[in-house]
Amino acid sequence: MRKRIKTLSGFAVFILSHRRADRVITYETLRRSGYTGKIYVVIDDEDPTRAEYEKKFGAELIVFSKKKAAEITDVADNAKELRGVVYARNMNFKIAEDLGIKHFIQLDDDYRHFQFRFDDKGQYCPMVSKNLDRVFAALVRFYISSGAATVAISQGGDFIGGSGSPFSDILMLKRKAMNLFVCSTERPFRFYGRINEDTTAYVHLGSTGKLFFTSNQISLEQTQTQANAGGLTEIYLDSGTYVKSFYSVIFQPSCVKVKILQSKNQRLHHSVAWKNAVPMILREQLRKPNK
């Protein structure tokens, strides 16, 4: 199975990072979890800690022009500072193409582990993954056959409550994509908005019929967003979750709104009305026969 990922027409994992040269946690997590393929760490040319990244990652470091990225990115505001991971997300397709990479997986830099959520019988049985080569190969194969714009995996927070959580009932696909993105230079798409760019992409492009999928068969666990300096933490602390969520409302006001997220610590968060968001996928057996 490990050969399959290497015989694809070019494959690599890209880790997007900013001002965290000493805390690219995802890199070690990938190796510890059994991924043996190519890894590139991607930063922008305005990162003040660039020298630290160069010293640590050498030839595995990719530096892109943030100004060029801004030319192809609609951030939905008029702020002068080029802040946000959206620039790196959009430039990743060009970076991969220049490297001769056809299929790739895009990751953030703060993942602590990858975890299977179901056993081979489809029963909820969480266990840490130790062979990401096989997992990534399977994800790429599914991505190719599905025709999706991108395929993602679930997050640890989706399974709060364990076997009683909605995501743990049955193997399923959700019409969204966050944190991990399986992509191809042959199926490029854009992310939108300075922050909440992942949600905005799947509702904005999903409304035109593009498919975004999340599988709950495996999940990733990341550090608490606002507890890890660098990256997007400063933006979240500056603007709060209301502004973050409202970027998605700007692009799709017909199906996204901001509301109170009911939890121990209440906060404002986006809410998607899926009946208004995307074209529905009907089961094949419901297709009317051709006359």
Image: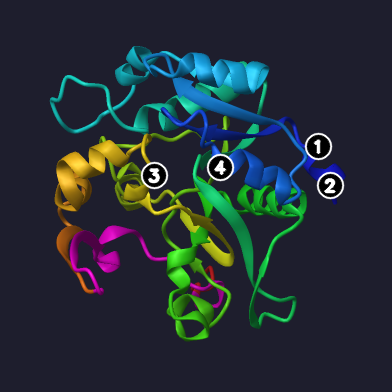
User: Seen in the image, is 232 located left or right of residue 147?
Assistant: left
Number of the label disc, if any, that sits on residue 25: 4
User: Seen in the image, is 107 located left or right of residue 138?
Assistant: left
Q: Quadrant of residue 232?
A: top left
The structure residue drawn at horizontal position 75% and vertical position 36%, both measured from the top left corner, is: 37
Say if 25 sits above or below 132 in the image.
above
Q: Quadrant of residue 78?
A: top left
Say if 79 sits above or below 157 in the image.
above
Q: Is residue 35 visible?
A: yes
- Measure how far apart labels 4 and 3 are at the Cα level: 11 Å
Q: Is residue 154 magenta?
A: no
Residue 51 lies, in percent from the top left, at 50, 13
Residue closer to the observer: 240 or 180: 240
Residue closer to the observer: 48 or 150: 48
Number of the label disc, if any, that sits on residue 2: 2
Callouts 4 and 2 close, C-beta under 8 Å: no
Residue 205 lies, in percent from the top left, at 35, 45
SS for tag 4?
helix
